[in-house]
Amino acid sequence: MIITTLCYIEHKNHYLMLHRTKKAADINEGKWIGVGGKFQEGESPDECLVREVFEETGYRLRSWRFRGIITFIQENYETEYMCLYTSEDFAIGDGDVPVSDCAVFSSGDSRDWPVPDCDEGDLAWIPVDEISELNLWPGDRIFLKLLGERRDFFSLKLVYKGNDLLEATLDGEVL
């Protein structure tokens, strides 16, 4: 069993997305996902979230919302339980100045916003309405849609064989 976090950082109707292109033997290779990673011994979900986001982006989350639990079942892999979060409130580096007050994020053109270096792939600010055009896992499309539609907490179970989604169950109901 693997326990992870994943966060979709939002700014001006854009998500910070990670194109997984650099990590060896990566099940997510070539896919676009949010930022996050595996728990370390003794970490709470919030502690893992804050640490992983900082390690991958250099951004320090100031607040966040726990949106759901995703259970991934994948042939030939351990079951993964992922704590899904969103955040619109973050600061750059060790500073405590919210991104909303940073001049570098004041431009309406996301191409002007800073994109941190990441050891696991390429980060990019993608308009939320263009996310569906990216190379995503089929189940990610489901929970990204739920993030846009629902304000409450949800549980989603995704069963895969290779890249194919065989089953999706939302709050106990098969989709």
Image (cartoon, helix red, strand yellow):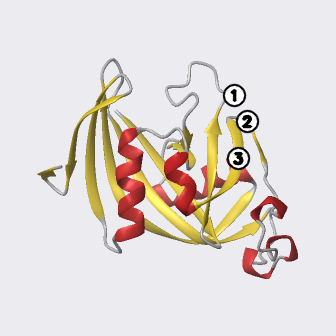
- Image spot of residue 6 (x, y percent): 50, 51
Element under disc 3: strand
Say whether residue 150 is left or right of residue 8. Answer: left
In the image, farthest residue toward the bottom: 101
Q: Residue at left 33%, top 17%?
A: 76
Identify the residue position indicated by label 2 in the image. Answer: 119
Residue 78 drawn above or below residue 69: above
Q: Amino acid at mark 2?
A: Asp
Q: Amino acid at mark 1?
A: Lys
Say whether residue 159 is left or right of residue 119. Answer: left
Local packing at callout 1 (Cα closer than 10 Å; few below 14, some 14-19, many 20+) is some
> Upstream in the sequence, badge 2 or badge 1?
1
Identify the residue position indicated by label 3 in the image. Answer: 123
* Distance between mark 3 and mark 1 Cα atoms: 11 Å
Nearest the viewer among 31 and 92 is 31
* Distance between mark 2 and mark 3 Cα atoms: 10 Å
In the image, farthest residue toward the right: 103
* Comparing labels 2 and 3, the label whose residue is closer to the camera: 3
Local packing at callout 3 (Cα closer than 10 Å; few below 14, some 14-19, many 20+) is many
Say whether residue 7 is left or right of residue 80. Answer: right
Nearest the viewer among 157 and 91 is 157
Identify the residue position indicated by label 1 in the image. Answer: 22
